[in-house]
Amino acid sequence: MKKSCLVTVIIVAFLGLVVLGLVLWGTKVYNQIVTLQEGVTGQWGNVENQYQRRADLIPNFMETVKGAANFEQETLTQVIEARAKATQVTLDPTKMTAENMQQFQAAQGELSTALSRLMVVVEQYPELKATQNFRDFQVALEGTENRISVERRKFNEVAQAFNTYIKRFPQNFIAGLFGFTARPYFESMEGAEKAPQVQF
């Protein structure tokens, strides 16, 4: 009788340690997933910040360009409309999907394309290119485009770390249990592999 009680106590203690070990492991995995997810969220904020910086530069530049005589109104309108659309498309970093990431990228891509067209048209206005305001804007825009590229690359890196972690066995059990899903990546826009053609 005493021996069977001792065996029961040992089994219960062993099972208790196994359960405690599983709880501690699950807690550690959950906390690591949360940490990685917050890294993705924080980096997404950096990406949005740079896109916002670009959007904020545009109104002052548009005023500079409008001052040029006979400047193409259609080109200005395209930039204004693309900026409005780009600032309306927002993305919740905790609910990212490939589809809403593509919508975000498409809106930002339209703005990039409109700005590229504007810069090509500006080439026909040497007096505009000679102004200090225009040169300042051009430098600021180039710097912002570089920052956007850097922040997008960093976002892809932290998203990859998060995605890899939640897809690995056995962390995928905890990720699935608490509804953590993979984050989409920034991808090259269609046609990005071809250099733009400039025609005058």
Image (spheres, rainbow, N blue to C red):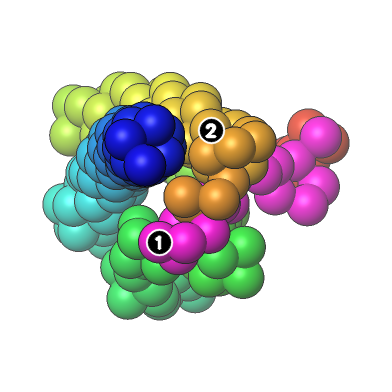
For label 1, count other residues whose C-alpha is less than 10 Å away and answer few (under 14), some (14-19) or many (20+): few
- Where residue 159 sits in the image (x, y, percent)? 49, 37
Q: Which residue is mark 2?
A: 165
Can residue 100 be seen from the camera position used here? yes
Q: Say what amino acid the circle numbered 2 marks.
A: Tyr
Foreground of the two, 107 or 134: 107
Q: Residue at x 20, y 58 (%)?
A: 59
Q: Residue at x 78, y 52 (%)?
A: 190
Alpha carbon separation for disc pair 2 and 1: 14 Å
User: On the image, which quarter does residue 103 sit in?
Assistant: bottom right
Q: Is residue 89 above or below residue 164?
A: below
For label 2, count other residues whose C-alpha is less than 10 Å away and answer few (under 14), some (14-19) or many (20+): some
Q: Say what amino acid the circle numbered 1 marks.
A: Phe
Q: Which residue is mark 1?
A: 178
- Where residue 179 sits in the image (x, y, percent)? 45, 64
Q: Residue at x 55, y 50 (%)?
A: 173
Q: Is residue 116 above or below residue 149?
A: below
- Where residue 80 sits in the image (x, y, percent)? 35, 70
Q: Which element is circle 2 on?
A: helix
Magenta stretch bounds: 176-193
Q: Quadrant of the N terminus?
A: top left
Q: Main secondary structure of the magenta part?
A: loop
